[in-house]
Image (cartoon, coloured by chain):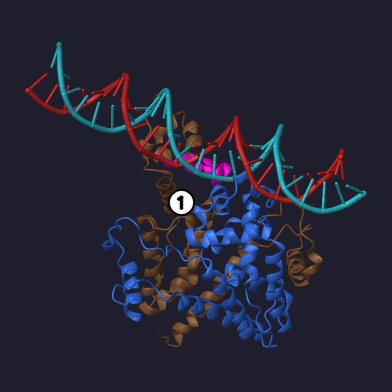
Chain colours: A brown, B blue, C cyan, D red
Amino acid sequence: MVTRLNRDRVLRAAVALADRTGLEQLSMRRLAQELGVVPMALYKHVANKDELIDGMLDVVISEIEEAADSGDWKPAMRQQILAARQAMLLHPWASRAIEMRQTPTPAVLAYMNGVIKIFRAGGMSAGLTHHVMHALGSRVLGFTQELYSAAPGGEPPDMTAFPYVVEMAMTAAHENDTIVGGGCDDQFEFEFALDVLLDGFERLHANGWHP
Amino acid sequence: MVTRLNRDRVLRAAVALADRTGLEQLSMRRLAQELGVVPMALYKHVANKDELIDGMLDVVISEIEEAADSGDWKPAMRQQILAARQAMLLHPWASRAIEMRQTPTPAVLAYMNGVIKIFRAGGMSAGLTHHVMHALGSRVLGFTQELYSAAPGGEPPDMTAFPYVVEMAMTAAHENDTIVGGGCDDQFEFEFALDVLLDGFERLHANGWHP
DNA sequence: CGTACTGGGTGTACGACGTACACCTAGGAG
DNA sequence: CTCCTAGGTGTACGTCGTACACCCAGTACG
């Protein structure tokens, strides 16, 4: 081998492979092939597949731009979370991967720490900040699980029994007047929900909410 | 065999097995063993594993109690979503399973339809209802991905670098004054976030929000 | 200069997994 | 009595993660 492997090369190749083929297509064997190496070689740089995915997520999280802390927590938070969303949009597999893991890596903790800092620096109480972080949930990392956002692969079920669902879908198609209504404006929906939450937090904070 | 298999017996056994051992321990082979049958026998009642999981989810969703529609959408919605949460608490694997699937089953659509109906019957516009449903996201089904709610299995990383995270954890331990602070009050956190959202929706609705 | 150590790539193998395919068999319909 | 068929069986394939033994190019050191 002309160039040696190292952890960084492995992680970057894994991220690239997942970007290209999706997370469920990522296997140790495929990744090894991609790197021109035998599968077991990877284990010299990565403990196992879970740890590989942790590392991949750290790469993604390190790409999140840090929001300018202006002292005004609301716009700072908005900017921070939308920056996280940009990183997640670049790596569509990342949100699913985060859902699968059950222990935060230091990189995640560091990111979280920065987010909490924005609230606290803005004068929000520790107690309210706690609940607010829970309320944001995965949104703090820039994603929500869009329930069934993918196009239905097989034949769609009979929709006539679900008139309200149909109406809702129609509303989407109408608002952003695309021809087939290829779906909703995800960015708008994300910001809509984010603003509802941030406005709610602001109101609670202003009213001196306490546990 | 004294008792024949059928789709219902398969699904119920699968649900019970997942309840007992978790979703990742559920395999076609284990489920077959549980039923005293050879693995391939399952495929006479279920197309494949994905379809099995869809069926299991339908079982769970059918357990959600329907909220009494009082004409006042806010308490009705609150009740409906908390009922969904109860069903999800009974089957901790269900939320993860829902995240994995990418096409809604008729049972899910029927549930969604009922939820949307509550908003519409309460006088909310179709457009606002649409965004509101997106904002609820998976919460409408009674769960949010609690980011890393599980206890850290291995050795926890050095926390001194993340003072704000530590403070937040301390706050949790303090509020519900358990000894070790075994975690947060999930029910409270869920309702807190839900109420922030519902209050926000109510305000937008009252102000005649439109796209 | 020789030798011993070690970091990193290799080869083989195992035990899971989902499931395709051919088969068999009990029980009901004609 | 015969045939059909729903449903359970047996075998087999390809894929997966990864344990374990090996081997080899440097390099450190006597």
* Boundaries of the magenta span: A11-27
Eyeballing the image, is A73 above or below A63?
A: below
Residue B9 falls in image quadrant: bottom right
Residue D11 falls in image quadrant: top right
The front one of B6 and B109 is: B6
Magenta span main SS: helix
Residue A143 visible (yes or no): no
Tell me what residue is drawn at x 70 percent, y 88 percent.
Answer: B71
The front one of A79 and A32 is: A32
Give the x, y percent position of residue A129.
40, 75
Eyeballing the image, is B130 above or below A150?
A: below
Question: Residue A13 lies in magenta, yes or no?
Answer: yes
Is B8 situated left or right of A106 in this image? Answer: right
SS at badge 1: helix
Tell me what residue is drawn at x 49 percent, y 35 percent.
Answer: A29
Give the x, y percent position of residue B49.
62, 50
Give the x, y percent position of residue B124.
70, 81
Residue underneath mark 1: A60
Which chain does the residue under circle 1 lie in?
A: A
Q: Amino acid at mark 1?
A: Val
Quarter of the figure that contains the C terminus of chain B: bottom right
